[in-house]
Image (tube, coloured by chain):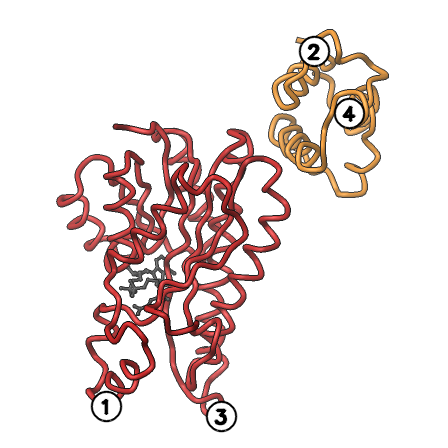
Amino acid sequence: MSLNATAVVTGAARGIGLEIAGKLISDGWTVAALDMLGDDLKKSAEVLGENYRPYTVNITDSKQLAEVAVEVGNDLPTVKGIVNNAGVTRDALMMRMSEDQWNLVIDVNLTGAWKVTQAFMRSLIRAREGSIVSISSVVGLIGAAGQTNYAASKAGLIGMSKSLNRELAGRGIRVNVVAPGFIETEMTQKLSDEVRGDYLSKIPAARLGLPVEIAEAVAFLMSPSAKYITGIVLPVDGGLTT
Amino acid sequence: MSLENRIAEIIVSRLNVKPEEVTDSANLKDDLGADSLDMVDLMMDLEDTFNLKISDEEGNNLQTVGSVVVFLKTKGIEA
Ligand SMILES: NC(=O)c1ccc[n+]([C@@H]2O[C@H](COP(=O)([O-])OP(=O)(O)OC[C@H]3O[C@@H](n4cnc5c(N)ncnc54)[C@H](O)[C@@H]3O)[C@@H](O)[C@H]2O)c1
């Protein structure tokens, strides 16, 4: 069943974002898939079909974003959902971290989410309904050595969302955060057995999570089932932070 | 369409009010029920429609429908 509404999902070409896009489409959303990987977007569009609308864009570029916002506004059903999922890491111990490494991660993960939300939020405000979900990380809650930049960006998303919630909740627009734990993706497949073992020993559920398990949580927060849930941080982490 | 009518049209659609409520002296917040988000939305709409920038300070001074008309006229907008 079509909702006749569009959800903008960033970083939707692959990984967790692609999984989120697929789940939202099966829930009836049209998905505006924003990513800078044009080829991956194209491949994913072949799999997910016509309700997956690819837009090649770098979310740090306000001008490109403004153009995409106009296109989406003209071509797709009313935007009523935003999922800020695009993210990068540039790990280094703080003593060795360059300013470029710091800036890139903050620019994409935090400022990018702010720009995307600002570019599309008027549509939700006009509709007087909608849902915004940002993908943070357990690292934003508990920190991780080598990730001062990433943790700051992910914690920043939480502050941004909680404040935006206070601006928008009265309009029927919900603003929430999902904080994934360690998830089986290309990123975590590269980990050494030692690091992997160390992670596993800290997770009560004794396994890594699956991208679909993040997508299910996001889809729930995007759905009417969650209509009285706003301003929260939902860890999906097998008990890691609890 | 006159400037007054164009402004009235925007206010009616943004604030969900009846055209007859949009009188010169009607206060956007007190009479027409605009909250702070509505006011921002309205200012952005006026900026887009009339292709100008409204500073926060200028926006704060726009209390009544009539003050919006006068403001736009001082900015050189006729219709
Ligand atoms: N994988 C994990 O274990 C894990 C854990 C916690 C949180 N997260 C978060 O989940 C999100 C998705 O992670 P993933 O594992 O699927 O990563 P991924 O690298 O597979 O996917 C991220 C996507 O974002 C896109 N992207 C990056 N920068 C962009 C930019 N400037 N403009 C447009 N698109 C851009 C990439 O092209 C990519 O398609 C990220 O925010 C990540 O921080 C992941």
Q: Residue B28 carries which label?
A: 4
Image: A24 above or below A194: above
Tell me the CA gap for discs 2 and 4: 16 Å
Question: Is the same chain shared between marks 3 and 2?
Answer: no
Identify the amino acid type marked 1: Glu
Element type at marker 2?
A: helix
Indicate yes or no: mark 3 CB to ligand 1 under 8 Å: no
Residue matched to label 3: A95
**Whole-percent x, y for residue A196 in the image:** 24, 83
Identify the amino acid type marked 3: Met
Identify the amino acid type marked 2: Asn
Q: Which mark is residue A133?
A: none
Element type at marker 3?
A: helix
Q: Image quadrant of residue A31?
A: top left
The quarter of the image that holds ligand 1 is bottom left
Residue matched to label 1: A194
Question: Is the same chain shared between marks 3 and 1?
Answer: yes
Label 3 vs 1, first from the N-terminus: 3
Tell me the CA gap for discs 2 and 1: 71 Å
Colour given to chain B in the rendered image: orange
What's the chain of the residue with tag 2? B
Nearer to us of marks 2 and 1 is 1
Q: Residue sitting at 51 percent across and 61 percent down?
A: A157
**Whole-percent x, y for residue A48 in the image:** 17, 43
Residue matched to label 2: B5
Tell me the CA gap for discs 3 and 1: 24 Å
